[in-house]
Amino acid sequence: MASVLLTGGAGYIGSHTALAFLEQGIDVVVADNFCNSQPEAIRRVERLAQKEIKVYEADVCDRAAMRRIFEENPTIDAVVHFAGLKAVGESVKIPLEYYRNNIDSALVVCEMTEAFGVHKIVFSSSATVYGASTEVPLTEDSTTGCTSPYGWTKYMIEQILRDYANANKQLEATLLRYFNPVGAHPSGMIGEDPKGIPNNLMPYVCQVAVGRLAKLNVYGNDYPTSDGTGVRDYIHVVDLAQGHVAAYLKSKVGVNVYNLGTGRGSSVLEVIHAFEEAAGVKIPYEITARRPGDVAICYADPKRANEELGWRAQYDLRDMCRDGYNWQRKNPNGYLDAQN
Ligand code: NAD
Ligand code: UFG
């Protein structure tokens, strides 16, 4: 039986995707160095799926370690490459670490697939490759360009995969451009567990909701949007996970790019209000200055993924808030709670 190698499979999106594959009866192997995740996430996926997962603690940049994984698992017929560093602000401060980790790991994935005759790669790209593009909704053909080293790593890896596919006519490379993944599995057993103070809106709101943080700073209310606050396309992580299964099942030769978003934009104030309603808690907030680098509006045209992958987001903003809150309430300190 075929199996799928998930690099970074213990992370936020990887763990939800591991569960989605297992629920479809597709086996997974995980390679993660746990630089931004906990082994506990995998144990919880195993409990939810009632299946064991073969996990390797390995750095994807380490060729020998990756070779061993492919040698020991000849059933691997695809790689979903999540492993990477992902904090936009941090990438500006330590760009070389971002380029080294993200580019090297992608190159090793390409080299190993070539060496072991594996032809399917699904890559975690990001709407960040649309840079400061102002044409919304963003289609896969919208202008690209980046505003951070993190973004450039995604852009460059997309190009590496295009060049690889050009030289290897059997390659099936799927580039998934995620919009804003949020929420958690409805069980509340797996979810997002950022280190330190969260940079992103939804985990920050969740931590305010459970009293771990006092109040939310809303970065600017003078954008050209309905209420002046920034608009994003939030997508439930379970929908996103299903998108990977669809991409694997519908994979085809060449390079295929898909936006994974809902197609609906929500402002920061809309998120706060949806959260307050779904969770039944008040979210104290204050309007502060704009955050440098933020765009006013970013949302997807997900038509191509809808039509070609037969995939469509099912959950709405209220579901995302309810499930994000459920996870945070059950695990106020993330996976650390399991170790106490
Ligand atoms: P995450 O940090 O939770 O998961 C990434 C995983 O990769 C972690 O488990 C980490 O330990 C692992 N990892 C990092 N470098 C590694 C290496 N060299 N070797 C082995 N493991 C390594 O992040 P996530 O939110 O699950 O994101 C997954 C992917 O999706 C990333 O590539 C990210 O850039 C991309 N993405 C995320 C978002 C988002 O908002 N979460 C948006 C767009 C794209
Ligand atoms: N925001 C606040 N307060 C906060 C955090 C965020 O008001 O404490 C606002 C931002 O200004 C923005 C919106 O909430 O208007 C969303 O911000 P996030 O940080 O949650 O998400 P971004 O759209 O800035 O970035 C995310 C990922 C990036 C990815 C990008 C595009 O973090 O990795 O989406 O996919 F590149």
Image (cartoon, rainbow, N blue to C red):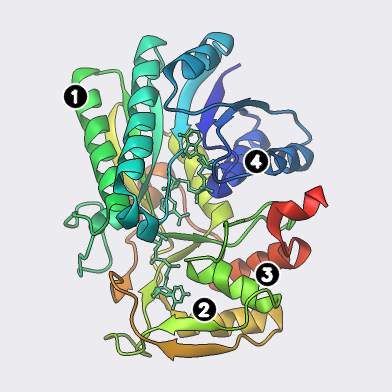
Left or right: 244 as drawn, with respect to 131: right
The residue identified by callout 1 is: 166
Q: Nearer the viewer, residue 66 or 27?
A: 66
Residue flagged by tag 4: what amino acid is it? Leu
Pointer 2 local density, CA inside 10 Å: few below 14, some 14–19, many at least 20: many
Query: In this rendering, would 188 be left or right of 321?
Result: right
Q: Secondary structure at mark 3?
A: helix
Quarter of image, res 174:
top left
- Count of numbered badges drawn on the protein: 4
Identify whether 287 is placed above or below 154: below
For residue 55, the mark is none
The residue to which callout 3 is attached is 325
Query: Is the CB of mark 2 within 8 Å of ligand 2?
Result: yes
Residue 91 falls left or right of residue 242: left
Find out whether the residues at labels 3 and 4 contact each other: C-beta distance under 8 Å: no
Q: Determine whether the residue tagged by mark 2 lies in a helix, strand or loop.
A: helix
Residue 287 percent location from the top left of the image: 43, 90
How packed is label 4: few (under 14 Cα within 10 Å), some, or many (20 or more)?
many
Q: Are marks 1 and 2 in contact (CB under 8 Å)?
A: no
Q: Secondary structure at mark 4?
A: helix
Mark seen at residue 19: 4
Q: Quadrant of residue 39?
A: top right
Q: Amino acid at mark 3?
A: Tyr
Q: CA distance from mark 3 to mark 1?
A: 45 Å
Q: Position of residue 85 (x, y in %)?
A: 43, 46
Q: Earlier in the sequence, mark 1 or mark 2?
A: 1
* Amino acid type, residue under disc 2 in the picture: Val
How far separated are the C-alphas under marks 4 and 2?
Answer: 27 Å
Q: Position of residue 126 (x, y in %)?
A: 35, 51
Which residue is drawn at the image coordinates 66% and 70% (left, top)?
Answer: 322
Please state which amino acid type lies under the numbered disc 1: Asn
User: According to the image, label 2 marks what residue?
Assistant: 271
